[in-house]
Image (cartoon, rainbow, N blue to C red):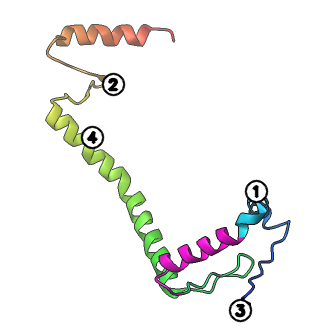
């Protein structure tokens, strides 16, 4: 029987960066490692449509991408605008809820102390409560 031509693939791993991969590799039984590597490579080919997707090593700085930088700038500007508009938006929501829900706004007395007036409380009762609140010792 003639010997078949073979290709050997070598993977270099370091204990400082690839500890998880080394531990996983060592957990595979010795007779199965070749089949596992072939399955992983075939899965990679299938997911990348037969092509190679370049992967930048972790320790190499990523190249500057002007399109991505522009997107980050646009997103930051949108967030800034949204935060600046937030107080006005919250105020409009509260006004809408008050108008739709029928909540009466605070009616202020001449001396500036707010008293909430509803149908259940007469103006005399409200004044009496207000005077009691002034006398209360907190």
Q: CA distance from mark 4 to mark 1?
A: 60 Å
- Which residue is at a point 70% across and 79% down the rendered structure image? 57
- Tell me how far mark 2 sits from mark 1, CA to CA: 80 Å
Which residue is at a point 56% across and 86% down the rendered structure image? 52
Please indicate whether residue 16 sits to the left or right of residue 61 in the image.
right
Horizontal placement of 38 versus 10: left or right? left
User: Which marked residue is nearer to the observer: mark 3 or mark 1?
Assistant: 3
Q: Which residue is the site of mark 1?
A: 27
* Residue 21 drawn at (x, y percent): 74, 64
Where is mark 4, residue-wise? 94
Dot 1, crowdedness within 10 Å: few (<14), some or many (≥20)? few
- State how many labels appear: 4
The mark found on residue 73 in the picture is none
Which residue is the site of mark 3?
Answer: 5
The relative height of residue 76 versus residue 108 in the rendered view (above or below) is below
Mark 2 Cα-neighbour bin, 10 Å: few <14, some 14–19, many ≥20: few
Q: Could you tell me how far apart the alpha carbons at marks 2 and 3 are, in whole angstroms? A: 99 Å
Mark earlier in primary sequence (3, 1): 3
Which residue in the protein does label 2 denote? Answer: 111
10 Å crowding of disc 3: few (<14), some (14-19), many (20+): few
Residue under the point 44% across and 70% down: 75
Point out residue 6 in the picture as x, y percentages from the top left corner.
72, 88
């Amino acid at each position: 029987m003639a010997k078949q031509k073979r290709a050997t693939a070598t993977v270099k791993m370091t204990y400082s960066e690839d500890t998880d991969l080394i531990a996983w590799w060592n957990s595979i039984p010795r007779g199965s490692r070749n089949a596992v590597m072939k399955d992983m490579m075939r899965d990679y080919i299938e997911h990348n449509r037969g092509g190679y997707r370049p992967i930048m090593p972790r320790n190499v700085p990523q190249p500057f991408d002007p399109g991505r930088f522009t997107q980050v700038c646009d997103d930051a500007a949108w967030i800034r605008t949204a935060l600046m508009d937030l107080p006005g938006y919250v105020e409009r929501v509260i006004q809408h809820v008050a108008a739709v829900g029928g909540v009466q706004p605070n009616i202020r007395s001449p001396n500036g102390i707010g008293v909430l007036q509803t149908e259940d409380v007469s103006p005399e009762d409200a004044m009496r409560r207000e005077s009691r609140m002034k006398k209360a010792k907190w």
